[in-house]
Image (tube, rainbow, N blue to C red):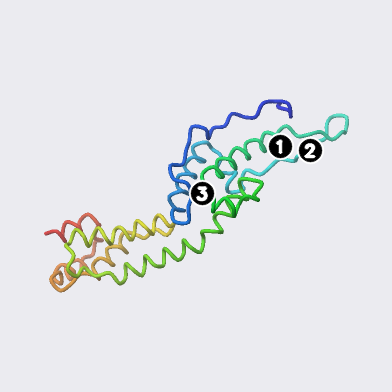
Amino acid sequence: MSSSSSSPPTNPLLANSVTEKLTKANHALWKAQVRSAMRGARLEGHLTGAMKAPEAEIIDKDSKKMSNPAYEEWEARDQQILSFLLASITRDILIQIASATTAFEAWQNIEAMFASQTRARALNLRIALSNTKKGNMSASDYFAKMKGFVDGMAAAGRPLAEDELVEYILTGLNGEFESLVSSLITRVEPVSLEELYSQLLT
């Protein structure tokens, strides 16, 4: 068993790095990188709170309190994760979560900080999907623009179903595509994005 004098557990996060530090504008990208690193190291429970801390003290065979080696190991691992998080964020974010003492607390603070921003971004992207028309854009440019909105929603944690995107794209087409729209909306089988793109180009 480990004890307070044993060396800390090997840090499985040393081989991982986040390519972009967290700023006020890249939360979704940063979160994807961090969660991937944590899952790869089987440590995501420290972020979600599922991997709870053992009791700090236990009773030995002589009924005396003693430090719990399992807690010491959990704490060492948790501090490694907290250090990883703090090293992957910019100074303006760090100032707001510097008081966090566990990885779970830091993660919760970051999630709360960006929750309203994420909702607002997803809503703005959905509005853009509703309002964007093909107009004078080429078919490929229009398709790419609409697909970009959906990719942004997925990155914000609000993925859109493929058939919904198809509906948005069809709704934004102008008169020259009237016959195509009519034929696709009367079909029984769903239209895939790949098929819709091919039809738009032809």
x%, y% of residue 154?
39, 56
Q: In the rendered structure, which disc, 2 or 3, sits on the residue that comes first in sequence?
A: 2
Residue marked by disc 3 = 90
- Left or right position of 178 against 190: left
Q: Amino acid at mark 2?
A: Glu
Q: Secondary structure at mark 3?
A: loop
Residue at x-position 49% and y-position 40%:
37
Q: Amino acid at mark 1?
A: Tyr
Residue marked by disc 2 = 57
Q: Determine crowd level at label 3: few under 14, some 14-19, many 20+ residues with C-alpha closer than 10 A.
A: some
In the rendered structure, are the residues bearing label 1 and label 2 in contact, judged by CB atoms less than 8 Å apart? yes
Residue marked by disc 1 = 71
Residue at x-position 59% and y-position 40%:
83
Q: In the rendered structure, which disc, 1 or 2, sits on the residue that comes first in sequence?
A: 2
Q: Secondary structure at mark 2?
A: strand
Q: Classify residue 135 by image quadrant.
A: bottom left
- Left or right position of 134 against 83: left
Q: Is residue 160 above or below residue 43?
A: below
Q: Amino acid at mark 3?
A: Thr
